[in-house]
Amino acid sequence: GDGMIQLKKDHEIEAMRLAGGVASTVLREAAAFVQPGVTTLEIDQFAGERIRHHGGKSAFLGYRNYPCEICISVNEEVVHGLASGRQVQFGDIVSLDVGVRYDGYIGDNATTVAVGGCDPAVQRLMEVTENALDEALDQALPGNKVIDISRAIQRCAEANGYSIVREFVGHGVGKKVHEDPQIPNFDDGSRRSPVLKPGMTLAIEPMVNLGQRHVEVLEDGWTVVARDGLPSAHFEHTILVTDGEPEILTCPGNLPSEPRES
Ligand code: MF3
Ligand code: CO
């Protein structure tokens, strides 16, 4: 982008609460739908139906020609996994990333769940990644800088011996999926990190690898995988920077009360 960080107006924030309510509700619904034997295509179609049921549209389908309703990334897949006939199995972990457009504004969130159960070491990876997101939210205060968020995530992941993916980052979000600023999940050494201000809406999304940080993109042009083949976890919220604590926009309490006719 051009570095201009928009401060959202009240009516925009209200639309983003609704988008976030749908995005978080569908993320929970999709997570509950995951069980051994279900295919990623079934998960994707289910999520698409739930998004429409709640009056939204996928913010990802068609974005840069992205071909699916949501992103579904299994095990060593980090982000942007594509739906297919693959059946998820007991012991897999599945990252779900749901972006919803509602009244022209977007809510973006992600979670990682085990299929039935998983190795305790992998369970710990998921817990630490979610903790990294929580610690990042604690830094999303007015007057702090983007890099305070980045450092909190990196500290949490690396203190536990994990690696931070560098090629993909959090971002501003609003009418568009990706707006300024970029929000790296590590200290990128920049001396000009933007100051956080009330009215900024940010998608914060740590991607944490159990092994090495290096990733590659598969032949499909989308699926990002850990090069060493070890599992990766991803958690994301869309938040509003306020005068005080951040407001989590991607929360089920923000679900619009009247589902629209589809
Ligand atoms: N939450 C993801 C991101 O911010 C969404 C992927 S965008 C799509 O990058 F291109 F895959 F649709
Ligand atoms: Co995002």
Image (cartoon, rainbow, N blue to C red):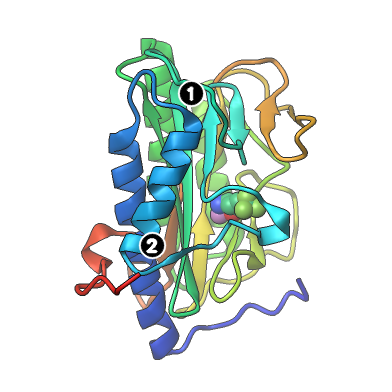
Q: CA distance from mark 1 to mark 2?
A: 39 Å
| Number of marks | 2
Amino acid on which the number 2 mark rests in the picture: Arg
Residue 24 rendering spot, x and y as whole percentages = 34, 55
Residue 104 rendering spot, x and y as whole percentages = 50, 79
Q: Nearer the viewer, residue 148 or 93?
A: 93
Residue 125 rendering spot, x and y as whole percentages = 45, 24
Q: On the image, which quarter does residue 209 sit in?
A: top right
Secondary structure type for disc 2: helix
Q: On the image, which quarter does residue 115 sit in?
A: top left
Residue drawn at (67%, 21%) of the image: 212
Q: For the N terminus, give its image quadrant.
A: bottom right
Q: Nearer the viewer, residue 91 or 202?
A: 91
Q: Is residue 15 left or right of residue 165?
A: left
In this rendering, which labeled residue sits more in front, label 1 or label 2? 2
Q: For the C terminus, give its image quadrant.
A: bottom left
Residue drawn at (53%, 83%) of the image: 7
Does the rendering let one see residue 60? yes
Q: Is residue 55 left or right of residue 182?
A: left
Secondary structure type for disc 1: loop
Instruction: From the image, tell me which residue sits under label 1.
Output: 160
Q: Nearer the viewer, residue 126 or 98?
A: 98
Residue drawn at (61%, 37%) of the image: 82
For this orientation, the residue located farthest to the front is: 262
Residue drawn at (75%, 35%) of the image: 220
- 106 vs 65: above or below: below
Q: Could you classify mark 1 by the number of other residues whose Cα lies within 10 Å: few (under 14), some (14-19), or many (20 or more)? A: some
Q: Is residue 137 left or right of residue 192?
A: left
- 166 vs 246: above or below: above
Residue 164 rendering spot, x and y as whole percentages = 62, 34
Quick one: label 1 or label 2, which is nearer the N terminus? 2
Instruction: From the image, tell me which residue sits under label 2.
Output: 52
